[in-house]
Image (spheres, helix red, strand yellow):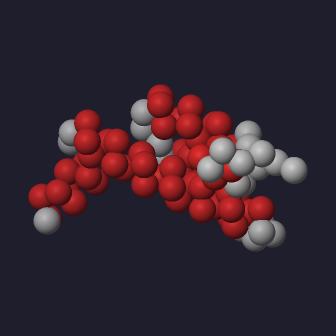
Amino acid sequence: MHVLLRSYEAKESPEAVCARDADKLECMLQGIEYLAQGHQNAQRWIDNSRARLVTDTAKRLADELLEQDSLDWLRTALDERRG
């Protein structure tokens, strides 16, 4: 397990980079949801997570998240329309 964690932290493989970016995107999404609930200190969490992204794909996904309402991603996944 320690080898996997070291690989993840060091970004030694494409899989490790992908996993780390996915983790940072998920943290960023949590921060966006907390900000929408009125927790103003969450902006720092969002900014920090965005800054730690490595791949262009993850950065584009982050930018898309930042341009949406905090639950638009879920509505899209569930094929719901905003009413």
Number of numbered discs present? 0
Q: Nearer the viewer, residue 40 or 64?
A: 64
Q: Residue at x 82, y 48 (%)?
A: 82
Q: Residue at x 56, y 32 (%)?
A: 60
Asked if residue 50 lies left or right of residue 37, the reply is left
Residue 44 appears anywhere in the view: no
| Position above or below: 64 against 81 | above
Q: Residue at x 51, y 50 (%)?
A: 25
> Could you tell me residue 42's position as x and y percent?
68, 64
Name the residue at the right extreme. 83
Q: Quadrant of the N terminus?
A: bottom left
Residue 66 appears anywhere in the view: yes
| Position above or below: 32 against 67 | below
> Could you tell me residue 31's position as x and y percent?
63, 61
Asked if residue 10 lies left or right of residue 29, the reply is left
> Could you tell me residue 18's position as x and y percent?
34, 42
Q: Residue at x 51, y 55 (%)?
A: 26
> Could you tell me residue 80's position as x and y percent?
72, 48
